[in-house]
Image (spheres, grey):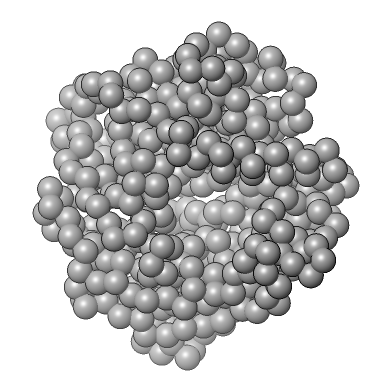
Amino acid sequence: MPRISVQLLAVFVALALTTLQLYDKTYASHAATVDESSGGFKTISEFSVDGNAEIMQAAAGGMYLVHTNSERNSIDVVDLTDPASAKKVVSLDMPGEPTSIGVSPDGKWALAVVYASKSKAKKKPLDPRLPGVLALIDLRDPANAAVTSLIGIGHHPDSIAVTSSGDELVGIIAIENEPLIVVDGKVVDDDAPGNPNDISEKGSIQIVSINPNKPNHYSLTTLPLESALLRTAKMLNIDDPQPEYVAIAHDKHLAAVSLQENNGIVLVDYLAAEIIGAFNLGVVAPRPADLVSNGEVALVQSYPTDASAELLAGTRFPDAINFTPDGQFILSADEGELPLTGGRGFSIWSLDGEFVWDDGGEIERRASELGLYPEGRSDVRGIEVEGITSARFGARDYAFAVSERGSFVAIYDITQPRTPVFVQILPTGKGPESVVAIPQRNLVAVAAEKSGSITIIGHSDNK
């Protein structure tokens, strides 16, 4: 397929303007009372951070959390020894905006990726070939965590997932390289793909292997996302891949990378350092929805049927992705990218790209019943599920999907991935970005960017 059309570009621009005008007015109110006893999960506390909390991981057996703080250009470490009174213990300065962090399986090391040369609107552009930064962080004593090495990587890293192989840490990095639009020598505040004035480099996937005890001993491999691959997978913008989010399957040398603007997922064998598959997530089947922002919540339209005049209505455009605990299925947070796109929920996929299940609008319906539906976003992607994870608590597998605009986490029992069962919804801080499950401590943590907070949720063993 050709690069995205001028019509689509115009829609992206209009959306950017609308978002700026509505950003603070389009989060759901948490006035409703939510029953926290029925599903076995219950809010324990909400911890306010200095700045914001976006991408977060657990460390040191779940006794600590580490998260990116883009307002402070730092990686912050939070002591979670007492979930009812979490506290920051360390803030590590980064040489730019940290966009993601991954923690080694043993919880002793972290790799953070940093966007070190971000061009600003209305200014002359920085060279889009300038490297980003990978920071190696020693977490063996989390209260005294320290950066031990900085390595140059691709220009605009957006996500990293970390595992280990022998004595080495292995990081899989999505080098997004968002469009850098330049008009008359100045950067335009626009990230629409397909713009002929885009001077950015093409996005890619990088794999870094590093011995944390010998940080000068590392290798960096770049996997290009070729247009032929994306064309075969029927993706939407084959010349601008923009990889978004990385997840690693448990007990497999398999990673999945979402390509949000392309509505697709790529599979990577990270030990062989090769791409082994790619597929398009398609369009959601019709489901009840509120498609009119008029101050009243009424899920009386059919989405995407009643939005058929809109470009790419119902296209999932996945943001975060994750694997089920056994690594046999992939979960996608179907956030959307344009007005009236997205799945307005989450989906499950087989490893060969077969559609398995999605919530069919159930999350939006239940959110509306609880007073958590963001009515001001009815005509702009609805609840916008942005983050997702899964974990086994006791004998059951659960999925945790966070709604950025509804400011809640939806919990499903996915022990049978082809027939998930709704469990409950819990409010979080405003504008949640990521969710981390810590089953060894019966905890779940949600990082909320807009409110600058971390919500700690507990699970009861008898549920």
Q: Which residue is located at x 37 percent, y 76 percent?
A: 93
| Quarter of the image where one finds residue 456 | top left
Q: Which residue is located at x 19 percent, y 73 percent?
A: 143
Q: In the image as oriented, which residue stretches furthest toward the right? A: 2
Q: Nearer the viewer, residue 301 or 434?
A: 301
Task: Tell me how many marks there are.
Answer: 0
Q: Is residue 401 visible from the viewing direction of this image? A: no
- The percent position of residue 285, horizontal first and vertical second, equals 64, 20
Q: Which residue is located at x 64 percent, y 42 percent?
A: 17
| Quarter of the image where one finds residue 158 | bottom right
Quadrant position of the N terminus in the picture: top right
- The percent position of residue 176, horizontal first and vertical second, equals 63, 61
Q: Is residue 366 left or right of residue 329?
A: left
Q: Which residue is located at x 12 percent, y 48 percent?
A: 84
Q: Is residue 386 visible from the viewing direction of this image? A: yes
Q: Is residue 314 left or right of residue 445?
A: right
Q: Nearer the viewer, residue 317 or 46?
A: 46
256 w.r.t. 36: above or below: below
146 w.r.t. 386: above or below: below
- The percent position of residue 82, horizontal first and vertical second, equals 11, 54
Quadrant position of the C terminus in the picture: top left
- The percent position of residue 221, horizontal first and vertical second, equals 63, 75
| Quarter of the image where one finds residue 339 | top right
237 w.r.t. 177: above or below: above
